[in-house]
Image (spheres, rainbow, N blue to C red):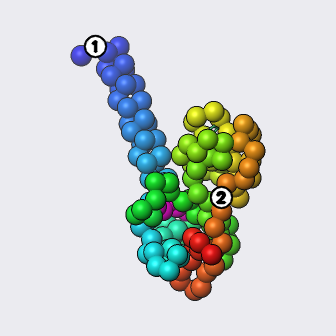
Amino acid sequence: MERRNFIKQCGLLGASCLGLSLFIESCGATHYVQGIASNNRLQINKSDFIILKKDKTTFRKYIITKLENSDCPIVVYRFSENNFSALLLRCTHQGNELNVNGDMLTCSAHGSEFSNKGDVIQGPAEQKLKSFPVTTDEKNIYIQLAA
Ligand code: FES
């Protein structure tokens, strides 16, 4: 093999590996959880936020859960040990399902953006996202779905 072709193939291989690792990392960023629903309340384990890497514990910023009979998922953000927000991933403009991009929720339909507390950052949406009251105990998070 000529030197030039060898260098070219090594470059392509390196770019492929980089692309694959970025893809795997992005896939691992979103964690989906099936909560336990009862009495208009959804229960999620706090441990679902834990990431263990080489004896080091870190926490996911958010997880996504979905009720069996709902067409729209809920994102649960972790701010601290006992401080969470639970937001319905439905745009308040025309009801499109939102995408989670770290601390930002975006709508692909017309470009609205929301914060991780549900506030409108950019329209055309004008209303906050639907949020659910959240309580915690030592091990669990409880999302109150209806009063
Ligand atoms: S439906 Fe989300 S911006 Fe229009």
Magenta stretch contains residue 54: no
CA separation, marks 1 and 2?
62 Å
In the displayed structure image, the side of residue 33 where residue 117 appears, left or right: right
Q: Can see residue 62? A: no
The residue positioned 50% from the left and 80% from the top of the image is 39
Q: Secondary structure at mark 1?
A: loop
Q: Residues within 10 Å of mark 1 (few under 14, many from 20)?
A: few
Q: Secondary structure at mark 2?
A: loop
Please determine whether, in this image, residue 16 is positioned above or below residue 84: above
Where residue 102 appears, as percent x and y from the top left, is 61, 50
Q: Which residue is mark 2?
A: 130
Q: Nearer the viewer, residue 40 or 60?
A: 40
Name which residue type carries label 2: Lys
Q: Which residue is mark 1?
A: 2
The stretch of residues the image draws in magenta is 60-66
In the displayed structure image, the side of residue 117 where residue 57 appears, left or right: left
Where residue 52 appears, as percent x and y from the top left, is 47, 68
